[in-house]
Image: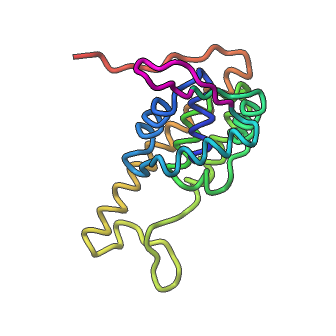
Amino acid sequence: MLTLAILGFLHDEPLHGYQLKALITGLTGHVRPVSDGALYPAITRLEKAGLLLRRTEPGTGAAPRQVLELTAEGRAELERRLAEPTEVEISDQIRFFTVATFLDRLADPARQAAVLGRRLAFLEAPSSFFYDADGLPVTAEREPNPFRRGILLVARASGAAERAWLAETIAELEGELEGHPKREPECEPET
């Protein structure tokens, strides 16, 4: 997901390495922190693959700064990764949220809807964190352990909210394909 985050954040504008790290940390740092030991080798690999360029510009202090920007090949790779996420990128919530963060960079609403449809299909398949001796998913109603029951209830609520969002967004994207204007999201009034 680090590669996708790098390509996604560099899509809009060139960034310094520390700016890129701050954006990635904001996206996944609470769950999966990014270290310099992971970020900078990933940047070097992407540079060697021709997906990004690194240039030096004067810094605000004495040291020059490294600026990173996508190449045309990097933009094409970002689009490919967004249009064809792997199964784990669909099934793992954090990885899927990283894909969804940059899905607007995929210009085709039909392809966006297809990715969201894959996630929705995954969420609609019966599953659980816990299974009984017969291999059947355990529901919150059947779980005597209050801690496991809590996990199941939270997952159910979260899954219901995500399924509703996915269905609504897919309908909006399909409406765009049929020539209907995109509906503006409803915002909560500021207090």
- Relative image position of residue 103 (x, y in whole percent): 62, 33
Residue that appears at 52% across and 84% down: 134
Quarter occupied by residue 138: bottom left
- Relative image position of residue 45 (x, y in whole percent): 67, 46
Residue that appears at 52% across and 27% down: 16
- Relative image position of residue 6 (x, y in whole percent): 58, 37
Residue that appears at 43% across and 51% down: 32
Residue span colored magenta: 53-66
Reply above or below: 62 against 18: above
Near-viewer residue (85 or 63): 63
Q: Is residue 19 magenta?
A: no
Quarter occupied by residue 148: bottom left
Q: Quadrant of the C terminus?
A: top left
On the rendered structure, is 156 left or right of 113? left
Reply above or below: 86 against 4: below
Reply above or below: 27 against 9: below
Near-viewer residue (86 or 146): 86
Outermost residue to the front: 62
